[in-house]
Image (tube, grey):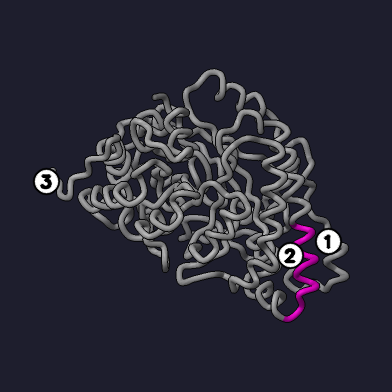
Amino acid sequence: MNSRERVLTALAHREPDRVPIDIGSCGPTALHATAYAALLQCLGIEEEIEFWDVVGQLAKPSEAVLEKLGADVRGIRVGGPKNGTRIISDDTLIDQWGTTWHRTESATCYHISAYPLRNATQTELAMYLFPDGKDPHRVNGLAERARFLREQTPYAILGEVSGHILERAQMVRGFDAFLEDLAAQPAFAEELLERIFIVENDIIRTFLDAVGAYLDVFAFKDDIAMQSGPVISPRMYRQFIKPYHQKLIEMIKSKTRAKIWFHSCGAASYAIRDLIEIGVDILNPVQVAAKDMDTARLKREFGNDLCFWGAIDTQNVLPFGSPQDVKAEVKTRLRDLAPGGGYVLASVHNIEADVPGQNILTMTHAAQRWGTYPLQIAEEESH
C-alpha cells in the first residue's frame, strides 16, 4: 500500500499493511522548533528551520525528514486574511481576531496577554469588527498545492482550519469571563458565539471551495475539555456549543467527501457520543494522561463508530521517558487502538521543546516495527 491507501483503509475501519503515522501534518501533530532541531541532529540533516506557526513556535518539517520518519500524511492549512496579523514588537503580536499574544524571554511559545472583548458590553460587541472569513488571501496558492499532493505524491492529504467556537470565545473574551457569561449573561454569550460561528463558517467554506475536492481528511478544532474533565458542563456544551459544531459539519460535508477530524485536548470522552451523532469520524489527540481517556476502553466502547488519531503521550513519556519507555508506550497504544484498523499513530498534540530527538525517532521506528498487520506486539523487548 502507499500512504494514502494506508490511511484511507485505516479510516474505513479495516486493517492496512501497517498502522499509519502522522507527524507534522497540522498544528496538533506538529513539532516545536527546538525539538525539530534536536531531531535534525539525530538524523544528521542540516537545513534551515522554517516556522509555519509563530505563536506556537512550530517548525515546518522538510520532505526529507518526513520521509525518514515514515509519515503518511501531508497537510494543507488555511491562511490568514491580508494584513491579518500585526507585529507589535519582537515579542508581541495581535492576531486577526484582535487578541494580543506575548512571548517572554524564557517561554517556548507565545501566550495571550490581552483579550479584545474583555470588558465589552453587548453594544460594544455588536460594533466590534470581526475578521473577514471570505478574504481570498486565505487560500492563495492552496489549490495548486492540494492538486500537486493529490496528483504527484502518494500521501494522504489533511486540510486544517481552526474552527474554534468555544475556544475562540474564550480567546477574545477571556477564559474566566466567558465562563461567567454562559452562566450569568447567556444572551451576550450566544451573540458572541453566533458572531464567531459566522466567521469560522465563512473561513471553512472559502477553504473547501478551493481544496475540498482534494482532501482525504478535514481537521477542525475546539477544546471542550481540560485535564480533569469538561471545560463547561455537558449540559452547557449541548446547549451552546454542539449546535454550532453540527452546523459546521453539515456545511463541511456539503463541500468535501473527506473524513471529519475533530480535535479537543483533555478529558473529552463525555462528548464522544455527541460528536459521533453530529458526524465526526476521527477523534484527536486522544490525550491519554487526562481523566477517563483510557485507550482500551475508548476502543471498546466507540471503536466501531470512531477512529482515533494520536495517543502517544507528550506529557510524560516523550519528554521524560527513555527510548524503552517510548517503545512501551507505542506498543500499548497499538495494542489498544490498532486492532481492526481505525487508528493513526501520532503524538498527543505538539511535540514540545523538551522532547529529545532520539525519542521522536524511537516513536516512529517503533510504530513501523510493531504496527505491521497482522499485529504481533511483543510484551517485552530486550533491545
State the residue at coordinates (40%, 27%). 64
> Quadrant of residue 53 in the image?
top right
- Residue at which label 2 appears: 116
Badge 1: residue crowd in 10 Å (few <14, some 14–19, many ≥20): some
> Which of 41 and 190 lies nearest the eye of the viewer?
190
Query: Quadrant location of the C terminus?
Result: top left
What residue sits right under mark 3 in the picture? 382
The structure residue drawn at horizontal position 30% and vertical position 39%, both measured from the top left corner, is 371
Quick one: SS at disc 1?
A: loop
Q: Which amino acid type is shown beneath numbered disc 2? A: Pro
Q: Secondary structure at mark 3?
A: loop
* Label 3 CA crowd tier, 10 Å (few <14, some 14–19, many 20+): few
The reply to whether dot 2 and dot 1 touch (C-beta < 8 Å) is: yes
Q: Is residue 211 left or right of residue 285?
A: right
Magenta-colored stretch includes residue 181: no
Which percent across, then down, holds residue 33? Answer: 45, 45
Left/right placement of residue 259 relative to residue 297 reads: right
Q: Position of residue 20 (x, y in %)?
A: 39, 36
Marks 2/1: CA–CA distance: 9 Å
Image point (29%, 46%), residue name: 359
Q: Which residue is mark 1?
A: 128
